[in-house]
Image (cartoon, rainbow, N blue to C red):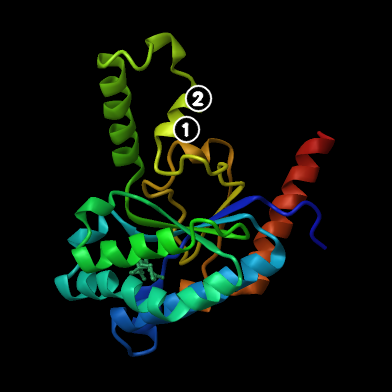
Amino acid sequence: MITGIPQHIAIMMDGNGRWGKQKGLTRSQGHFAGSKTMENIIMDSLDIGINVLTLYAFSSENWKRPQKEVQYLMDLPAKFFKEKLPEFMEKNIRICVSGDIEKLPMHTKSAVQSAVKATENNDSLVVNFALNYGGRNEIIFAVKAIIGDIKESKLKINNINEELIDGFLYTSGLPDPDIIIRTGGEKRISNFLLWQSSKSELWFTDTYFPDFNKELLLQAINEVQERKSYQARL
Ligand code: FPP
């Protein structure tokens, strides 16, 4: 039984490539299967009553992958939003993006920006896509913006606090994640939500992302609830 639904769950969708290989398919076919799982998990999150779902779709390190794979991943958002946007509108889902989207190819950037714009007034689940996202880059970007504001006398050094820094991050306005899930067996944070994860519970599974499902999502939520009630009893 779930008591106290987490506000924000973030998922590192790892293991698509290995899933493809295991099935005798290409890595890109693994990403396609991952994108289908992602669609299910978005709807499951809405059913469960989660407010924010952050999905690590492309890290700032992923550019080092074979060009064909990068191109496939850059083509996915346009296809995905073309197909899914009507349903997102119907279900009142809002799309957000976290990351340096200026460096995305034009067709990727415009697909994402149009989805963000079209859904900006929706107020059920927020789906935040981390795209060309790197936690350290995000902090550098925030530091530069803060220094810029100090130089222009819009901000005083004494006013720098946690809330102010929150407001300079890509995730500005979103609550910190309660749970960070990583699929695919690795147990690292890999430059994901470095500032925002300060109090997050981490949950790992060996399951490759294309095989991730609602049952595992509920298992993660339940286990974290158990950890919290154990901590409260100490
Ligand atoms: C990590 O698995 C996964 C990615 C780099 C991409 C994840 C992207 C999706 C699930 C779809 C995104 C779709 C949209 C519309 C934004 P991996 O390739 O590192 O797997 P491996 O560890 O087995 O190599």
Residue 185 image point, x, y percent:
47, 64
Using residue 47 as the reference point, say whether residue 28 is left or right of it.
left
Q: Residue tagged by mark 1?
A: 166
Distance between mark 1 and mark 2 Cα atoms: 6 Å
Asked if the residue at label 1 sits under 8 Å from ligand 1, the reply is no
Q: x and y percent of residue 128 in the render?
A: 47, 56
Query: In the image, is the residue at mark 2 within 8 Å of ligand 1 by its beta carbon?
Result: no
Relative to residue 87, is residue 179 depicted above or below? above
Quarter that holds the N terminus: bottom right
Residue at figure coordinates x 36%, y 76% from the top left: 31
Residue at point 64%, 71% (across, down): 44
Q: Amino acid at mark 1?
A: Asp
Please determine whether, in this image, residue 37 is positioned above or below residue 149: below
Q: Is 5 on the left-hand or right-hand side of 35?
A: right
Question: At 64% from the left edge and 66% from the top edge, which residue is drawn?
Answer: 46
Q: Residue furthest bottom?
A: 24
* Front one among 78 and 212: 78
Query: Quick check: 219 left or right of 208?
Result: right
The location of residue 4, given as percent across then percent down, is 77, 51
Circles 1, 2 touching at the beta carbon (< 8 Å): yes
Res. 162 mark: 2
Above or below, 82 relative to 234:
below
Where residue 14 appears, x then y in whole percent? Answer: 42, 65
In this picture, is 102 found above or below 44? above
Residue 3 lies in quadrant: bottom right
